[in-house]
Structure formats: C-alpha cells, structure tokens
Image: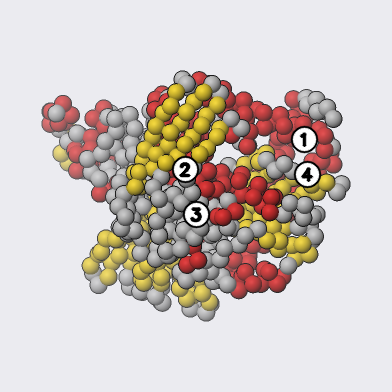
C-alpha cells in the first residue's frame, strides 16, 4: 500500500498531539503518585512506541531512563510475541531483558485500534523500594543481583483488561512502605491509560494511514538531523577515556573508553570496559545504551523531534559480555544508572569532542547521594525513600557561559527536581537543617562550573538508616578547554556525619545508622569549568565571592585573584597581576 501524502499542517498537528500526550502522561505521574521520588523529584520517564516497536517520541525526562527503553521495549515485545492482547498491561524491571536497574520499574500498555496493535504507551519510574535486604534497593554489600531486590521479567499484571490482583499483591507484599509503592504503581497505570486515550482520539480524527505516515516523517526528520550533524564531522576514528574512581569496592580506579568511528553519515561507537566485579556498579547492556546515547546527545545538541530515528545510522558495540558496561547475570548492578553510566557518558562525550573541538563542554557533577529509611512514629508505619535532593550537583561550563547551579547530576541532565524541603519534612520524620549551594564547588575556568549542593538531615525521634551511593568523591568533574582547579576537596562529593560534636567524613558507599541528635550532610560535586581560570574576568571572580560561590582562598588559588578584604572586596591589582602571570 502506498504511503499517504502528508501535508505540513497535518504533520504539525499530529506532532503536537504526540508531544502533548507525552507531557500529559508525565503530569499524570506527578499529580497522582504517592512517593516524593515521583511527585517531588520527578524521577520517571515516558515514551511512545509504534507497533514495530520503534520509539516515536521520548519525553524530555530522565536521559538515563530513555536510551534503555528502546531495547527494553523490543525485549518485552519479543517475549510476548503473538500473545499480546487488547487490555494487557505488562510490568518489567529485569536488566536481563534490557531493563536499566531493578529499581526503575516499567509498564508497557499496548494500544489497539479496530482490533490492530498500533501503539505502545510506556512509563518508567524509580520506586522507593523493590524488596531485598537493604531499604531503597541500593546495597553496597551485594555481590550478586539476588541480594538487591525483586527481579521482574516481563509479566502481565492486566490480562485482557482484567487486573491480576494475585500478581500485584505478591509483588507489593515484598516491598517496604507498600502504600507508596501501590500508589506509584497506580500512577504508572494511569499515565499509560491517559496516553492510550489521547492516541485513540488522534486515530479517530485522522485515521491510521495518515497518522502512520506522519510518524514516519517525524522519524525521518530526526534521522536527517543526526545524519547532517555526523556528515559535518571529518571521517576518522576518535577516542575518549574517563576514569571511574574506586568508591569502596577495593578494586581501584577503572578506565572506560569509547572509540567513535565516523564514515560519511554513519557513526559506530565501541565501548571498552574492565571485567565486571562483585559490587553494585555493573551495568547490563540495555542500561549502557542510555549512557552512550546521552554522551552522543550532549555532543549533538539537536533540535526535536527526539525519537528512535536519531539512531538509525548509529551502531554500538558494548564490548564482550561479562564486562562492567555489558554485565552478565548475576552481577550486582543497582548503582548502575549513575555509576558507571556517568563515566561512560563522559568517555563518549570526550571522543566526540575530539572529533569536533568547537562543540566541547565540561562534564557535569556525578551523582553522590543517599537513601533513607526507618519507622515513622507519627503514623506507626515504615518509610523509605531515595533522596533525589541529595544528588543535585552542578552543570558543566561551555565555551560561552558558566555552568548552571544545582542542575545535575550528569545522568539526569537537568530533568530532576529537588521538590520543596517542607514537603520532604512533611512526608518523612526528618528535619532538614541545610539545603544550599556550596562555596568553591564549581570547577575553575574562564567559565566557572555550576555549584553543587549540601543536603543536611537529622531524624526526628527514631533511628534512621542512611545508605550512600555513587562516586565523584575524589575525582572532580572534568573541565574542558584548558580548565584546571587547584582546590580539589571542595569540588568533590562526600558525606559528613556529626556525632557527639565530632564530624566524620565518609567517601565510600556505606550503610549508616543516624540517631536523633546526629546529623548527616551529603555534599555534592560541582560541574567542570571551561578554559584557563587565569583568564576569568577579575570582576566576575569578585562577584562570585560576593555571592558566596567562591571563597577568598578559592579566588587566589583557583583564579589568581587576590582580594584583600571580604567586606570591601577590594582587589590587590599588583599581586593579582603577578600571580596570574606566574
């Protein structure tokens, strides 16, 4: 059958409906979810697929979710090949079926029109708990995936429109804070249904043939944007290597490398990583696609539409099975969406920047966060949550501007939000003593990296379990264009626990008990700087000191600017000139 001709007006309207549908799905998650991870932090993502299934629209949500949805959707479709019916609803989180990590639970809803499978609406969200021995799913002591939580291979929780309450009850019974998990499950279901409703209305108005023709045009449009960009890059092979620091696993630092080969309008990306280890930073292949695609898109900076057409001329080799970025079961992996993904993203980005230096930008701060759990005596019930506010770091600088403050980490790329501190204190039995930007945390450069944040908490009246995850506690975010920081300690992450008047600095991933009267301050890295910091305008350094972003010592050591007095902020011009010349 010949493809329908698409006029620009119809194409624009169909595109608008698809984009509005995706946004309405994310709003449904925000407004109906139970946990703070959903309704405050927005740690979820949505996407639309056609019947192929090919991603026809990815939400402007969490990047580390979206790349893995492409192979995951195909794995789910293949698993139920020939057994997908109208009214089915499929649940899945297993990395062996291309999931990201088991805490990110995904729902897939097939949309039928006049008896034919036409679309899939898909929602992925980070549950606050997934069972297992450690609350919130991050277990730094796990040596295999079975010690992390429930693995859910593709399974129908609705069968032809009938909810499988036995399956749902079995799953929720094995999760802490059941009320939150059940509420978030219902939000995911509702978002999928909202998407299906809108798509059905679109088909009623324009017909299947016209809508499919519009979608193919949108896929071609995205493909054309990417091909044009790749064609501008000189043919050749380019390399990038980033260092993944030891965050308590004892195996030392690791190199993750990316080799990018450009041939005409085609791009091949080859990943090299060390063998997998018995620690929770292994990444299975599906999740690693997210890291690769994020590195590519940081370089590409293309306009929408964002769909699978972007990657039609991009091939990826994750390396052999059993490696850190292509793990084999039963490798533990819960930390994988941040570590090693952010390092993998940096490696890919560095390779592309070697190919096109004019597109260079500094790295964003890596995730360095914590989860909390305990007993809420106000309601006599258990609580558990991932504290997304605790991983908000700084963005990297570019060749034309400073990095944004409190916008990271790299894996979320600005899509994560902190939520109101008062809402967190209302939801959980905690006091948040501090949530602020951190002085000297932004990477030094002609353009300064964005500042990281400090999140300091104390439990109200009962002990609280605190679990740390991530890295970036020794190696700061990478700068670019000749950027270099002299002050390092202030630009890396760390946990500071204060007990009995003494503060202990922790830089490994640990499980700690924090008692009432004690405080835990999680401090996040800033973004990398761009350019020689000695070329930063002196007036801008003074302004950073005035705003509490740079200290007097930081101004001198990082920028060669000698400020004699904090009150007047007067600059010793002779000493500054001498220091900068040296």
Mark 2 residue element: loop
Residue 326 percent location from the top left of the image: 48, 48
User: Could you say whether the residue bearing mark 1 is in a helix, strand or loop?
Assistant: helix
Looking at the rendered image, the disc whose residue lies closer to the viewer, 2 or 4, is 2
Q: Which residue is mark 4?
A: 118
Residue 543 vs residue 18, the one in the foreground: 18
Name the foreground residue: 522 vs 139.
Answer: 139
Q: Residue at x 41, y 28 (%)?
A: 238
Q: CA distance from mark 3 to mark 4?
A: 33 Å
Marks 3,2: beta carbons within 8 A? no
Q: Measured from the top left, where is residue 13 in percent x and y?
A: 74, 33
Query: Local crowd at mark 3 within 10 Å, few (<14), some, or many (≥20)?
Result: some
Bin the neighbour count of mark 4 within 10 Å (Cα to Cα): few under 14, some 14-19, many 20 and up.
many
Tag 4 secondary structure: strand
Q: Report the side of 423 relative to 140 (left or right).
A: right
Q: Position of residue 316 (x, y in %)?
A: 52, 37
Say which residue label 3 marks.
328
Which residue lies under the disc numbered 1? 212
Q: Which residue is mark 2?
A: 319
Q: Earlier in the sequence, mark 3 or mark 4?
A: 4
Q: Are marks 2 and 1 in contact (CB under 8 Å)?
A: no
Give the mark nearest the N terminus, 2 or 1: 1
């Amino acid at each position: 059958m010949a493809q329908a001709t698409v006029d620009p007006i119809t194409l624009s309207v169909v595109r608008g409906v698809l984009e509005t549908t995706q946004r309405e799905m994310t709003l449904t998650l925000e407004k109906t979810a139970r946990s703070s991870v959903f309704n405050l932090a927005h740690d979820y993502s949505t996407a639309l697929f056609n019947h192929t299934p090919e991603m026809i629209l990815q939400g402007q949500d969490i990047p580390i979710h979206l790349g893995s949805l492409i192979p995951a959707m195909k794995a789910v479709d293949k698993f139920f090949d020939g057994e997908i019916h109208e009214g089915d609803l499929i649940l899945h989180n297993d990395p062996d079926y291309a999931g990201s990590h088991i805490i990110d639970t995904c729902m897939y809803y097939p949309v039928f029109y006049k008896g034919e499978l036409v679309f899939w609406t898909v929602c992925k969200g980070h549950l606050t708990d997934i069972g297992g021995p450690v609350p919130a799913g991050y277990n730094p002591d796990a040596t295999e995936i079975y010690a992390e939580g429930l693995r859910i291979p593709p399974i129908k929780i609705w069968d032809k429109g009938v909810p499988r309450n036995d399956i749902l009850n079995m799953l929720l019974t094995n999760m802490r804070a059941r009320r939150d998990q059940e509420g978030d499950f219902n939000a995911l279901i509702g978002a999928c249904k909202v998407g299906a409703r809108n798509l059905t209305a679109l088909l009623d108005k324009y017909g299947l043939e016209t809508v499919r023709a519009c979608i193919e045009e949108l896929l071609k449009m995205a493909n054309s944007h990417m091909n044009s960009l790749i064609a501008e890059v000189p043919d050749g092979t380019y390399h990038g290597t980033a260092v993944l620091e030891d965050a308590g696993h004892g195996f030392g630092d690791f190199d993750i490398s990316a080799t990018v080969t450009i041939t005409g309008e085609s791009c091949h990306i080859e990943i090299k990583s060390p063998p997998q280890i018995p620690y929770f930073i292994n990444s299975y292949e599906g999740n690693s696609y997210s890291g690769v695609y994020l590195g590519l898109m940081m370089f590409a900076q293309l306009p929408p539409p964002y769909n699978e057409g972007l990657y039609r001329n991009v091939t990826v080799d994750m390396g052999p099975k059993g490696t850190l970025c292509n793990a084999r079961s039963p490798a533990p992996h819960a930390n994988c969406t941040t570590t090693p993904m952010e390092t993998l993203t940096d490696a890919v980005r560095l390779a592309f920047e070697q190919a096109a230096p004019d597109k260079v930008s500094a790295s964003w701060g890596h995730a360095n966060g914590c989860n909390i759990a305990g007993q809420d005596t106000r309601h006599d019930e258990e609580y558990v949550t991932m504290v997304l506010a605790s991983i908000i770091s700084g963005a990297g600088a570019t060749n034309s501007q400073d990095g944004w403050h409190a916008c990271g980490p790299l894996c979320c790329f600005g899509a994560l939000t902190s939520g109101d501190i008062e809402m967190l204190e209302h939801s959980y039995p905690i006091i948040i003593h501090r949530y602020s930007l951190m002085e000297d945390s932004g990477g030094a450069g002609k353009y300064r990296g964005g500042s990281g944040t400090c999140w300091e908490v104390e439990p109200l009246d009962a002990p609280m379990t605190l679990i740390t995850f991530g890295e970036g506690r020794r190696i700061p975010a990478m700068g670019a264009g000749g950027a270099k920081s002299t002050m390092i300690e202030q630009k890396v992450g760390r946990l500071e626990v204060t007990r009995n008047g003494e503060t202990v600095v922790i830089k490994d991933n640990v499980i700690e008990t924090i008692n009432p009267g004690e405080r835990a301050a999680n401090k996040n890295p800033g973004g990398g700087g761009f350019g020689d910091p000695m070329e930063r305008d002196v007036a801008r350094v003074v302004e950073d000191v005035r705003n509490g972003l740079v200290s007097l010592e930081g101004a001198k050591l990082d920028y060669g600017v000698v400020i004699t007095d904090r009150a007047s902020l007067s600059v010793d011009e002779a000493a500054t000139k001498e220091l900068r010349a040296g």
